[in-house]
Image (cartoon, rainbow, N blue to C red):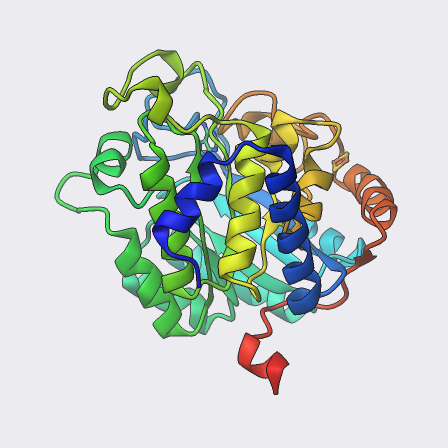
Amino acid sequence: MMDVREIEGWLLESAPECLAALWAQADAVRRRWVGDEVHLRGLVEISNRCVRACAYCGLRAQNQGLIRYTMSAGEILDCAVRAAELGYGTVVLQAGEDPALRADRVARIVRRIKSHTPLAVTLSLGERSDAELRLWRDAGADRYLLRFETSDQELYRKIHPDLPGRASDRMRMLRYLRDLGYEVGSGVMIGIPGQDYGSLARDIAAFQAMDLDMIGVGPYLPHPGTPLGTGWLPRRLPESRQVPATVEMACKVVALARIVRPDANIPSTTALATLDPEQGRELGLRRGANVFMPNMTPQPYRGAYEIYPNKACIYEEARACRPCLEKRILGLGRTLGRGPGGRTRVEEISK
Ligand code: 5AD
Ligand code: FES
């Protein structure tokens, strides 16, 4: 167990020898609890339409600088089949909050993937109703990803406006997903303008308290089509308290997430690879992560799923990440994960 003060102390640490000890501890915990396998999850960005107005995200409804798309069921199924052919154990269907992705349509797609492939299916479709989440679980969806973005409610409300008449309560939704039997993933952005060290430390303490199955964290990257990316500040913060969106800070959060949730599946994220295209993927994997989520979205949609600019692998074809990743993973002395790669709980390992 680590308390919030200790976590905050690590976030403020800058001595190289202390950080080396943190990386080593996170790597040792990772090896002990989830082993050397790196699980690959094929990410398919099935729609970039979104009704929300998040101040940080390029998919926000008000951004007119994007060509909008919703993939057809056939296109999505083709991607899933390709993910299975490439040896990925999981397909992740991610989108903005797109009303065209009606509940019954999504359920049908999930059922088709589950009957045509051996893949685990992860959904990441934003804030949806209890009835929809239940329908998709009944259709066979295995996991759901929904970052809470920041546990700082004042900051969250400013950067993530509610829909009219419907207060955003992601913590409640995450509990409901768990009750439905999904494996549940969440996480935060690192270095959001207005995010201070105490607030980020409480995010990490929340990972511990929430018993998350999956934890995804990445640096905040400014998008010029958004308020937050063009100088708007949700609140004033002395510079010394503002969390920087750096590779080192993102690695600290990956490492601390691993230490507080030893058996969780933790990806080395695209945002980290975007901030450091050469080394970012490896740094994440060496400092606590055990998962990678290669982008499988077909061109030209891939370029249009612009949550933030210059996303890693934006010009690649779906297959291209596979050999690149294999080389990177084997180069670290790690192995390619086999099977769906769900969570094995600590209690089951220690038996
Ligand atoms: N920079 C980094 N990450 C972002 N996300 C959204 N916008 C940005 C941004 N500008 C993250 C959010 C969201 C996930 C899909 O992408 O955490 O949950
Ligand atoms: Fe996509 Fe290397 S991970 S090309």
Q: Position of residue 42 (x, y in %)?
A: 67, 50
Which residue occupies the foreground of this view, 66 or 36?
Answer: 36
Which residue is nearer to you in this view: 334 or 342?
Answer: 334
Q: Where is 236 relative to 179, above or below?
A: above
Relative image position of residue 37 (x, y in whole percent): 76, 61
Image position of 280 (left or right of 121) = right
Dividing the image into 4 quarters, which one contains the N terminus? bottom left
Residue 114 lies, in percent from the top left, at 61, 68
State whether residue 83 appears in this view. Answer: yes
Q: Residue at x 68, y 34 (%)?
A: 280
Write the residue at 61% across / 40% down: 19
Q: Quadrant of the C terminus?
A: bottom right
Left or right: where does residue 89 sit relative to residue 172? right
* Residue 173 versus residue 324 in the image, above or below: below
Image point 79% across, 43% down: which residue? 325
Residue at image x 31%, y 34%? 52
**316 relative to 282, above or below:** above
The quadrant of the picture showing ligand 2 is top right
- On the image, which quarter does residue 174 sit in? bottom left
